[in-house]
Amino acid sequence: MPRLLTALTCVVIVACGLGVRALWDGPVPKYAGDALYTALIYALVVLALPRVRPWVAAAVSAGLSWAIELAQLWEIPELLRPVLGSTFNPPDLLWYAVGAAACWLVHHRLRTRQR
C-alpha cells in the first residue's frame, strides 16, 4: 500500500472519530470509537509495514486493542489514561474485532484489485 495513502487514511480515521464524538451521544460514539481506534492501529501497522498481509495487520491491530482493554483490568497510569482508557468494558472487545475485520475486508479487496 502506498504510504501517502495510508497516512491520509490515518488522518481520515482520526477525523471520523472526532466527528462521531461531536455529532452523537450515547453508545454510538463509544463503540464507533472502539472500532475506529482499532482501524487506526491497523493503518499504523500498514504505514510501518506497507507489504503486510491483511490478515496479519488485522490480527496485530485486534490483538493490541484487546491487550490494551485487558490491561484496564489493572491500574493504568494516570498519564496514559486519556490514550489507553481506564475502565474495562467487555463489549469493547467485540467492537475492536469489528474494526479489524472491516479494515481486513477493505485492505484485502484493494490488494486483490491491484493484482
Image (cartoon, helix red, strand yellow):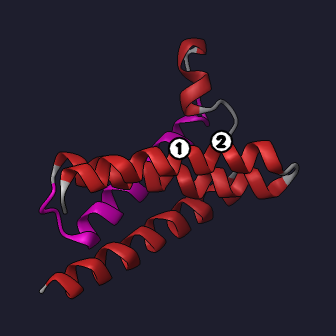
Residue found at the very far right of the displayed protein: 26
Query: What element does badge 1 sit on?
Result: helix
Q: Are marks 2 and 1 in contact (CB under 8 Å)?
A: yes
Judge from the rendering whether residue 25 lies leftward or rightward of residue 85; answer left or right.
right
Q: Position of residue 80 (x, y in %)?
A: 53, 20
| Residue linked to disc 1 | 14
What is the magenta range? 50-74
Pick the residue in front: 83 or 15.
15
- Look at 55% across and 13% down and name the residue there: 79
Which label is found at residue 18?
2
Q: How many marks?
A: 2
Magenta-colored segment: predominant secondary structure: helix
Q: Which image quadrant for residue 87?
A: top right
Where residue 68 appears, as percent x and y from the top left, is 49, 40
Q: Is residue 59 magenta?
A: yes
Q: Is residue 70 visible?
A: yes
Work out whether residue 75 can be spotted.
Answer: no
Residue shown at the point (60%, 14%) measured from the top left: 78
Kind of residue sitting beneath label 1: Val
- Locate residue 45, reporting x and y percent: 27, 50
Residue 38 place in picture, x, y as percent: 48, 53
Disc assigned to residue 88: none
Q: Toward the viewer: 24 or 56?
A: 24
Q: Secondary structure at mark 2?
A: helix
